[in-house]
Amino acid sequence: PVSSTMLDLPIQVVLSYRTAVTCFAVLDLAITVLNVVAAYATGLVWNWWQLLFLVFLLGPFCGILGASWLRRELVGVYLAFCIVKTCIQLYSAIFGFFLWAILFVFLQIWITKIVATFCYFLGRLSPIQRQMALDAKDYEVQRVYW
């Protein structure tokens, strides 16, 4: 493996955050599916407008693809999803004042910060640097989750 010090800083940051964003997007996708299934399983009567909740699956799906293909526009969609989810959880924590809801707000803010950092550095890459990052299979990178 080649040392990551040979890569430019934006490439190193993108490669370091890539795995974290993919993991969080997969978790978001699974949690969103579980929430929809749990609502259906509890006997919730479905109307056509309630299927709009399935739109929330697009965010994590775009996050997975965006991190895999290093596509900023897809990661931007996931970032928007994270911001909306943070607002919803913040609303729930303020008006529900439930300890777990408050903890989930902090967790969601942390995830949103990681996705935003990844999206920012992805935007700083030129097309050539992005291709270098996609081809960097043998480079040692530091995986970060903060």
Image: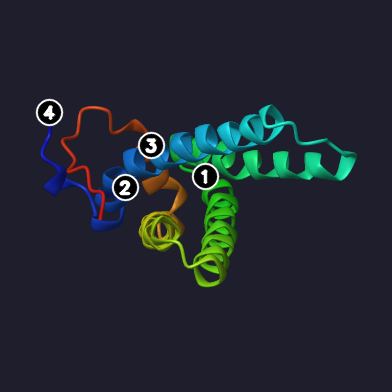
Can you identify the residue that label 1 sits on?
Answer: 71
Identity of the amino acid at label 4? Pro
As helix, strand or loop, the secondary structure at mark 3 comes to helix
Q: In which quadrant of the rendered view does residue 53 lie?
A: top right
Q: Which of the labelled discs sits on residue 101, or is there none?
A: none
Q: Reading the chain from its start, which is encountered first: label 2 or label 1?
A: 2
As helix, strand or loop, the secondary structure at mark 4 comes to loop
Q: Which of the labelled discs sits on residue 17, or is there none?
A: 2
Identity of the amino acid at label 1? Arg
As helix, strand or loop, the secondary structure at mark 2 comes to helix
Q: For the residues marked 4 and 3, what is the alpha-carbon distance in whole angstroms? A: 24 Å
- Where residue 135 appears, x then y in whole percent? 34, 31
Q: For the residues marked 3 and 2, what is the alpha-carbon distance in whole angstroms? A: 10 Å
Identity of the amino acid at label 2? Tyr
Can you see residue 113?
A: no
Q: For the residues marked 2 and 4, what is the alpha-carbon distance in whole angstroms? A: 19 Å
Tell me which residue sits at (65%, 44%) in the image: 56
- Kindly give the residue lying farthest to the bottom in the view shown: 94
Q: For the residues marked 2 and 1, what is the alpha-carbon distance in whole angstroms? A: 13 Å
Can you identify the residue that label 3 sits on?
Answer: 23
Q: Reading the chain from its start, which is encountered first: label 3 or label 2?
A: 2
Q: Give yes or no for contact between labels 4 and 3 (Cβ–Cβ under 8 Å).
A: no
As helix, strand or loop, the secondary structure at mark 1 comes to loop
Q: Reading the chain from its start, which is encountered first: label 4 or label 3?
A: 4
Q: From the viewer's perspective, is residue 123 above or below residue 66? A: below
Tell me which residue sits at (62%, 32%) in the image: 38
